[in-house]
Image (cartoon, rainbow, N blue to C red):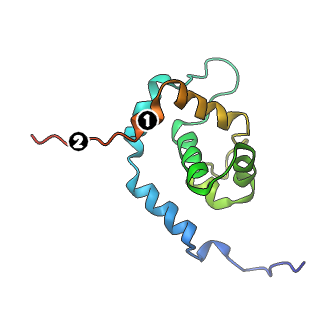
Amino acid sequence: MTQLGPGLDLSTKRTRKWEFLDEMRRVVPWPRLIALIEPHYPKGKTGRPPFPIATMLQIRFMQQWFGRSDPAMEEALYDVPLYREFAGLGEGMTRLPDESTIPRFRHLLEMHGLAAQMLTPQTKTSD
């Protein structure tokens, strides 16, 4: 196995996956979806603080878009810097969502019927 030489910046290539996630960052109504989930999301009064809703929602979407199981998504978060960046898991993070945290979020969406509500189009009202 050959190693990459020093000075090779792999972050400069805009891959199809990078372009896709960049587009999704712009077109998905993240604030509306976060507001929909927030009343049902744990507040983290005891134990480890929960990950931000935006992070978990973006991970859930990536699972759907790229066909990843819970364990595969956890592994991808460790392996793929682009996934961590999209989910807002920057360099300062001391932990990543694991294969038990990821399905808990999915179950929360299912339990409250939020996934179906997310797909309901919002109509704009004129003033």
The picture places residue 110, in percent across and down from the top left corner, at 54, 29
Q: In which quarter of the image is the N terminus?
A: bottom right
Tag 1 secondary structure: helix
What residue would you read off at disc 1? Answer: 116
Q: Please indicate, yes or no, whether residue 98 appears anywhere in the rendered image.
A: yes
Residue displayed at 41% across by 38% down: 118
Name the amino acid type tagged 2: Thr
Quadrant position of residue 116: top left
Q: Which of pointers 1 and 2 lies earlier in the amino acid sequence?
A: 1
What residue would you read off at disc 2? Answer: 123
Quadrant position of residue 33: top left
Residue displayed at 59% across by 46% down: 59
* Viewer-nearest residue: 37 or 5: 37
Q: Which residue lies furthest to the left in this view?
A: 127
The picture places residue 65, in percent across and down from the top left corner, at 56, 55
Please state if 68 lies on the left or on the right of 29 as rendered.
Answer: right
Tag 2 secondary structure: loop
Give above or below for 114 relative to 28: above
Give above or below for 119 relative to 72: above
Q: Dot 1, crowdedness within 10 Å: few (<14), some or many (≥20)?
A: few
Q: Distance between the residues labelled 1 and 2?
A: 16 Å
Q: In which quarter of the image is the C terminus?
A: top left
* Viewer-nearest residue: 32 or 110: 110
Name the amino acid type tagged 1: Ala
Q: Please indicate, yes or no, whether residue 87 appears anywhere in the rendered image.
A: no
Residue displayed at 57% across by 44% down: 60
